[in-house]
Amino acid sequence: MSGLDFLQSVQFVTAKGKRLAVLDAEDWEALIEWLETLEDVHIARQASTELKAADGDRQRAGWKGRSGRAWPER
């Protein structure tokens, strides 16, 4: 289901003079997962752009190794 599908599946109710949006809990969780995936894609694209700008040099791009230390020099 796309983000647009989720938004179109919202139902509205009025309670105590307020209009509220109601979404099935499973749909809500799927929407959160979808948004997290979008965020991950954005982060990956940004990292790729930074690495390309550093001519593939991970250290110059500011990346760190798994241990949290800088990459060894080539």
Image: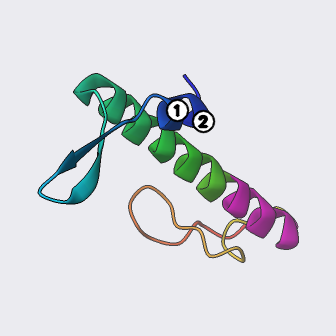
Compared across the picture, whether 48 is left or right of 53 comes to: left
- Please, what is the dominant secondary structure of the magenta stretch? helix
Front residue (pair 73, 51): 51
Find residue 50 and name its label. none
Q: Residue at x 32, y 35 (%)?
A: 28
Say which residue label 1 marks.
Answer: 8
- In the foreground, 38 or 56: 38
Q: What element carries label 1?
A: helix
Secondary structure type for disc 2: helix
Q: Are marks 2 and 1 in contact (CB under 8 Å)?
A: yes
In the image, 68 versus 50, the foreground residue is 50
Classify residue 63 by image quadrant.
bottom right
Residue type at mark 2? Answer: Leu
Compute the Cα span from label 2 to label 1. 6 Å
The relative height of residue 8 versus residue 41 in the rendered view (above or below) is above
Q: How crowded is mark 1: few (under 14 residues within 10 Å), some or many (20 or more)?
A: few
- Badge 1 amino acid: Gln
* Residue assigned mark 2: 4
In the image, residue 13 lies at what x, y percent? Answer: 26, 41
Q: Position of residue 29 (x, y in %)?
A: 31, 33
| Range of residues picked out in magenta | 45-55
Q: Does the magenta stretch include residue 48?
A: yes
Tell me, yes or no, whether the highlighted magenta stretch contains residue 49: yes
Residue at 11% in and 57% down = 16
